[in-house]
Amino acid sequence: MNANRGMSPLTALFIGIFGVGAVTIAGVSSVVLYAMRIADHRITDVLGLAENTIAGLPELIDSLPPAIGDLLNDRRAPEYAASLDVDVTFVTDERSGRIHPVMTIANEGDEVVSMLAVRVAALKANGVPIREWTEVVATPIAIENDWRGPLMPHATRHVVLSRCSGFPVKNADAVTAVYEISEVRVWEPTDG
């Protein structure tokens, strides 16, 4: 009798399947570990770049031309809102037959307002809001219509609110406007 007996086909199938599975797991693990190593080096490089950029930011700001550098020299000043006199009224536009909101802002303080955003709501006579929007009425620099420029001390600015398309004239007595100052920033001159 022959004591060496060959493997059964079922045993060979199981050994083959588990062998292929083990090789696949080892290969995928190697690729994942290599990818993690590369990602670790890249993240370290990006964090180093960000750290160097932040460290060099003051020198970068100082090297900017004055027109651009001045844009960054302001501070949030919610207490300065008390120095601003704001009024929103509706005026009739004869050509369109509609009423449009107009805002008048008077800077009664001694600071230059570099950013002023005002939240406006149009209300029905019963106080229900029918439209709301934010209007930026002072910006660090003046460019075209939406960038109106800073509001100088003791200056008054009149703005036709562009975000509102207006209301029919028949609603002139039934619509009022309320406002809320949502952002005030004042310019701070540099020491140098």
Image (spheres, helix red, strand yellow):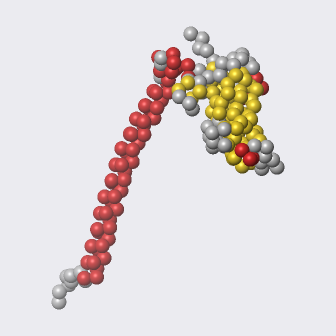
- Residue at (39, 44) in percent of width and height: 39
Residue 93, visible in the rendered structure: yes
Q: With 15 as the anchor, is 141 left or right in this view?
A: right
- Residue at (75, 40) in percent of width and height: 177
Quarter of the view holding residue 19: bottom left
Q: Furthest residue to the top?
A: 192
**What percent of the width, then of the height, locates residue 120?**
70, 39
Q: With 66 as the anchor, is 171 left or right in this view?
A: right
Q: Furthest residue to the bottom?
A: 1
**What percent of the width, then of the height, locates residue 53?**
46, 27
- Residue at (27, 78) in percent of width and height: 13
- Residue at (43, 31) in percent of width and height: 49
Q: Is residue 17 above or below residue 98?
A: below
Question: Which of the pair 15/90 is nearer the observer?
Answer: 90
Which quadrant is the N terminus positioned in? bottom left
Which quadrant is the C terminus positioned in? top right
**What percent of the width, then of the height, locates residue 125?**
81, 47
Residue 182, visible in the rendered structure: no
Q: With 55 as the anchor, is 22 left or right in this view?
A: left
Quarter of the view holding residue 139: top right
